[in-house]
Image (spheres, helix red, strand yellow):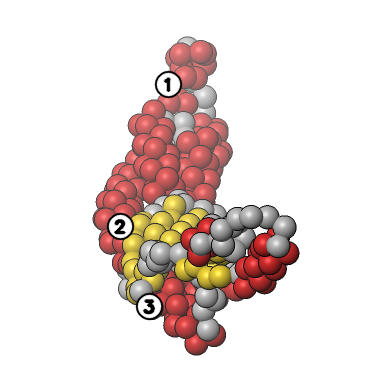
Amino acid sequence: MTIASMTGFARASAEALGRTATWEVRSVNGRGLDVRLRTPPGFDRLENEIRARTARRFDRGNVSLNLTLETPASAPRLQINRAALDQVIALIGELSGRLDAAAPRLDGLLGVRGVIETVAETPLADDEQAKIDAAILSSLDKALDGLATARRDEGRALLAILDATLAEIAALTAEAAANAATQPAALKARLESQIAELLGAQHAIAPDRLAHEAALLAVKADVREELDRLRAHIGQARELFAKGGAVGRKLDFLSQEFNREANTLCSKSSDTALTRIGLALKTAIDRLREQAANVE
């Protein structure tokens, strides 16, 4: 299993009874799963099922789902409003004995407002609506599958970047460990030099007192615990990469732990080289955190 990104796009269509249902789905980074749905009027009944199918595939990301439904164009159907026509004929009968006028022609009767009506489209039967709903959900499944594939493809590229960054952190941790091993002797030499500079050679401090003071400074500057935790975090990150799946939240938390240890290392450092390594660690860890924010 590989990790997946939270960004992607897919499109899919299905057809039923001359109608084409088309889904466009896209996702971007998000702290949790947020599904935003747009459907034509009259399809609210499918909302719960659509959200459930999306939640079964994804754990994180802001997912936008947009459905369009193309229906076949049809000419309006006309019919005669017989009640209105009967009223017009009755009025003509009443007036025929009073007015000297020719009998009305058929086209004249049909031209009277209200005699001809436009009939709305016949509502779909239940079985027809069920077929259209099935096409909508079928195309949704295809679009969600396509989105999942797109997110996995980007996840593979993301994993390569994360691996390289973690390797850099591991190398810097090893460099810091090698530097820290020389700290006690360096601290003693620096302390001896500073005392000699301040007091002069005639006031040299006793060797055992110098060793004691150097030991106290070495304890305060000891970064072995931080280095051990950094190495443990590196191992945990590699395990998450190998496990794959929805590990984004764990990687985000681990990045915070990495940063905490690097900050402590820098604060304890009394050596320019070790401080430089600590700052480089913080830079690499920040890149790791930025990339981890893209992982599902």
Circle nearer the N terminus (1, 3)? 3
Residue behind mark 2: 154
What residue do we see at 53% from left, 58% from top? 108
Q: Is residue 45 above or below residue 150?
A: below
At a point 37% along the width and 32% down the height, the residue shown is 276
User: Which quadrant is the C terminus positioned in?
Assistant: bottom left
Residue at the image position 51 percent from the left and 40 percent from the top: 263
For label 1, the residue is 193
Of 274 and 203, nearer the camera is 274
Q: Are marks 2 and 3 in contact (CB under 8 Å)?
A: no
Residue 187, position as x, y percentages in the image: 44, 32
Front residue (pair 176, 222): 176
Q: Nearer the viewer, mark 1 or mark 3?
A: 3
One can see residue 108 in this view: yes
The quarter of the image holding the N terminus is bottom left
Q: Earlier in the sequence, mark 1 or mark 2?
A: 2
Q: 10 Å neighbourhood of mark 3: few (<14), some, or many (≥20)?
A: some
Residue 31 vs residue 23, the one in the foreground:
23
Q: Residue at x 59, y 64 (%)?
A: 115
Residue type at mark 1? Answer: Ser
The residue tagged 3 is: 16
**Which amino acid lies under the numbered mark 2 shown in the image of this protein?**
Glu
The answer to whether residue 41 of the structure is visible from this angle is no
Disc 2 packing (10 Å; few <14; some 14–19; many ≥20): some
Q: Nearer the viewer, mark 2 or mark 3?
A: 3
Crowdedness of circle 1 by 10 Å Cα count: few (<14), some, many (20+)? few
Residue 175, given in percent of the width and then of the height, sits at 31, 44
